[in-house]
Amino acid sequence: MSAGSTRILSAAKEIILSGGVIGTPQILLNSGIGNKTELETLGIPPLLNLPDVGQGLTDHVATTIAWTVIPSNTPTIDETTALAMWQENRTGPLTEKFTHQILWSRFQPDSSIFKEFKDPSTGPTSPHIEMPLGSDSGPAGTFCLLTPHSRGSVKLRSKNPFDDPLIDLGLLSHPFDMAALKEGFQGPDPDNLSDEEFEKIIRDSAFTYLHPVGTASMSSKKSKRGVVDHELKLKGATGIRIVDASVFPYILTAHTQAAVYILAERAADLIRDAW
């Protein structure tokens, strides 16, 4: 195809959309599939009114815990020697991982947090938090909330399909998430900090684990909510399936990569059985 030319390609059986948690809703919305009112406001003719397209964006929120140490306790690395060891036999400091140990933990059943909020975990053995411990290069760790309540969205900036979408992660927008981070963030200083100072530290240092899900969520075929049914088929349409993490209606209490592999294998079975 030459630059600027347009070509229409037709699928003989069905289209598999795997644009990712950001790309999938962006493609659907640009195609006229989404919230009818919002599409009309942008000047996009609505073809299928599915208000949940782009809604429900969820990610694991985390914050880093770090302390200052005495310089003599900090390992020194000779960069030239380290590089030589790596180039010669793949050993030495450059083989160091981000972390060698990861801790998972649940809040206690009698935790004060459950006096105000319902437990969002998937079961009695499901963790609420994950803590990768820092490596030998420094005494730091990461506290990650695996069961966030906060939700965000992916919306179109304009009807130009090449414009970046508007992404609102919605981090810490639900009070449970801040309460949970405060509950689990146990270091040398929290008892000496006011609630305002504590929350500011968390907000200023918060980041995501890059585990987004939920912008084209799955629901039962009869439900008016959601974007795809249990066979990953786009609701209200024929010949389109979505196969990526956007279909997960809730975020996993784990990293999402393995779950996406499982989803893809299940999708392959569904497609093979259909054709």
Image (cartoon, rainbow, N blue to C red):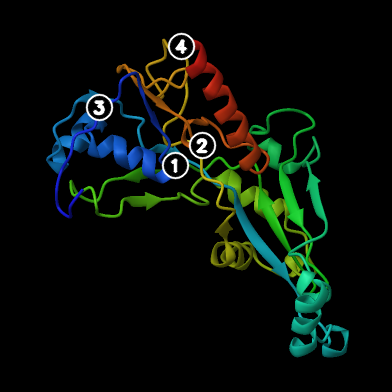
- Residue at horizontal 35%, vertical 21%? 14
> Given contact means CB atoms under 8 Å apart, are the residues at marks 2 and 3 in contact?
no
Q: In the shown orientation, is residue 267 left or right of residue 161?
A: right
Question: Which mark is drawn over residue 10?
Answer: 3
Residue 219, x across and y down, in percent: 47, 20
Residue assigned mark 1? 20
State the CA–CA distance, disc 4 to disc 1: 23 Å
**x and y, in percent, of residue 151 in the image:** 47, 42
- Residue 274 image label: 4
| Residue occupied by mark 2 | 245
Determine the CA span between mark 2 and mark 4: 22 Å
Residue type of the residue flagged with mark 3: Ser
Residue depicted at 15% across the width and 37% down the height: 44
For the residues carrying marks 4 and 1, which lies nearer the camera in this image?
A: 4
**Residue 33 image offset from top left, x and y in percent:** 26, 30
Task: Tell me whether the residue at label 1 lies in contact with that at label 2, contact meaning CB atoms closer than 8 angstroms.
Answer: yes
Is 273 above or below relative to 193? Answer: above
Q: Secondary structure at mark 1?
A: helix
Q: Is residue 109 visible?
A: yes
Residue located at (48% from left, 18% from top) = 271
Q: Amino acid at mark 2?
A: Ala
Q: Earlier in the sequence, mark 4 or mark 3?
A: 3
What's the distance in space between the residues labelled 2 and 3, CA to CA?
25 Å
Q: Which one is earlier in the sequence, the residue at label 2 or at label 3?
A: 3
